[in-house]
Amino acid sequence: MQGGGNPINCGTCWKNMPPVTLIYLIITGPVSLALVISCLALSSKFNCYIFGYLSLTPYQIYQKGEVWRFFTPYFVNNSFWSIIYVLLGFFFSSVVLEKAMGSKRFGIMLAICLILNSLLCTAFQAFFGLIPGINSVTYFYNQWYDYTPIGSMPILILIQILDIRAHKRKQMMCCCFQMPVWLYIILLVVMAQLMMYPIWYGIFYNISAIIIAFAVPMKYLQVREQLPLTNAPGQAYDQNAAGRAVAPAGGDNFQFTTMNGAQTAQEKKKEAKATKNESQWGKGGKKL
């Protein structure tokens, strides 16, 4: 209950959820959960061969032609903690951003960002994993060949940074207090890295997401105005109202016909002006 009004309805929440966010949550949650349980059953949680077919492995992509790996890493997580962390973080940021941008534009931009992130990440892996001398270090050499289940943390980093930039946020709420966005981003990346297993893997994966998120031109992050997510003090929270888009741009000059014949803002202005003139000059045009 909020403000003594109607209770929050989970069905309304799902109904108002934008399609791209809903599809991602429906896919990545059950898929990740099924994979983790399967790997636990095989007694090989973090090195399960099933993850090997879905991970971002440059050798398999460029030398074996397994191009699906450009996308599949963003839909799988390697632990219960990372599943919960990604789903909650993605939900709270993606819903707001998708409603503000529009589902079609949001979906296209997200798909392009994920492809660019995979390309940039594999470029880092190729540089460190194939150049003689550098690849003599086992950690760098393995970047090109390893089936590392690094999870879907980059998509969370992408969405949150894009949301911060699109809405020009200066502060973010975290751990019950406000913090500057630069500190929030650092904390976000550190937490995402800690969700990796082992934690020293996937560094290029997350770094690439940061670079791509800040490289997106602002003209592609233009958002529409939205209704406030909370009502005035003392009023009940309206989930349906929060899920609807606000009136289009144009202010009082935008005209529309209401279903119940109510006056538009422009009509009200004209009526008020006529009433003022009549009270000042009279119906006959003579000043009173």
Image: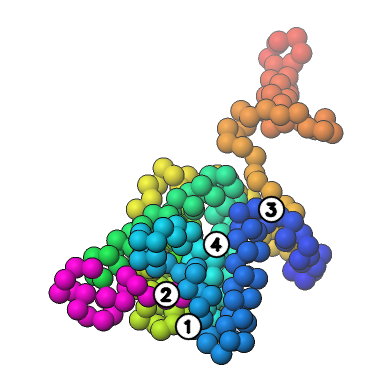
Spatial distance from mark 2 to mark 4, Cα to Cα? Answer: 29 Å
Identify which amino acid the numbered label 4 is placed on.
Ser
Spatial distance from mark 2 to mark 3, Cα to Cα? Answer: 41 Å
Residue 38 drawn above or below residue 225: below
Can residue 100 be seen in the rendering of this structure? no
Classify mark 4: helix, strand or loop: helix
Q: Assess disc 2: are there few (<14), some (14-19) or many (≥20) residues with their C-alpha within 10 Å of its C-alpha.
A: many
Classify mark 1: helix, strand or loop: loop
Residue where numbered disc 1 is placed: 47
Residues drawn in magenta: 130-152
State which tag comes first along the sequence, 3 or 4.
Answer: 4
The disc placed on residue 243 is: 3
State which tag comes first along the sequence, 2 or 4.
Answer: 4
Q: Assess disc 4: are there few (<14), some (14-19) or many (≥20) residues with their C-alpha within 10 Å of its C-alpha.
A: some
Classify mark 2: helix, strand or loop: loop
**In the foreground, 176 or 115:** 115
